[in-house]
Amino acid sequence: NFGPNQYPEKLIPVLILKALNNKPLPLYGDGRQARDWLYAEDNCAAIDLIWQKGKVGETYNVGSGNEKQNIEVARFILKVLGKPEQLISFVKDRPAHDRRYSLNSDKLKKLGWKEKNKFEDALRKTIKWYKENPG
């Protein structure tokens, strides 16, 4: 999940805030860890739909299919902000760091859920929010 007002220790806020301040963007290892990114509003809409139409006792994964590597996310943020890719800094990876997080959301989609916010547009909105809310 990502979006405006996210706690600043998470990857996307870290990258945005570092880039805004022309500081190195730390990426673990080679930056190729993959995550299935979902805009927070879409996550909330999925939970609401599950509440309304889901089957009691059933498990529903909420994922977007927007699998991106951390380095792709960093490069996109830098591009939107007009900052150089040289700000990317590779740091020692954490022991046993997961290489990929991904979900199968087929059951959720059968309920009629579809994300409304495309990854790039949602990330642009998130970047804009952090620019306008530096505190």
Image (spheres, grey):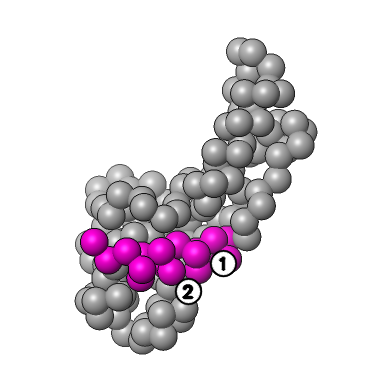
Mark 1: amino acid:
Glu
Instruction: Tell which residue pokes out farthest to the top in this image.
Output: 57
**Badge number at residue 76:** 2
Q: Residue at x 55, y 41 (%)?
A: 43
**Badge number at residue 7:** none
Tell me residue 51's x, y (percent): 62, 23
Q: Main secondary structure of the magenta part?
A: helix
User: Is the residue 19 above or below the residue 38 in the image?
Assistant: below
26 within the magenta span: no
Name the secondary structure under disc 1.
Answer: helix
Q: Residue at x 47, y 74 (%)?
A: 76
Q: Residue at x 63, y 18 (%)?
A: 58
User: Is the residue 81 above or below the residue 54 in the image?
Assistant: below
Q: From the image, tell me which residue sits under label 1.
A: 120
129 within the magenta span: yes
Tell me residue 123's x, y (percent): 50, 64
Q: Quadrant of residue 45?
A: top right
Tell me residue 44's x, y (percent): 55, 38
Q: Residue at x 43, y 69 (%)?
A: 128
Instruction: Tell which residue pokes out farthest to the front in this image.
Output: 132
Circles 1 and 2 in contact, beta carbons < 8 Å: yes
**Looking at the image, which is closer to me, 125 or 79?**
125
Q: Is residue 119 visible?
A: yes
Name the secondary structure under disc 2.
Answer: helix
Q: Is residue 62 left or right of residue 32?
A: right
Mark 2: amino acid:
Phe
The range drawn in magenta is 119-135
Mark 2 burial class by Cα count in 10 Å: few <14, some 14-19, many 20+: some
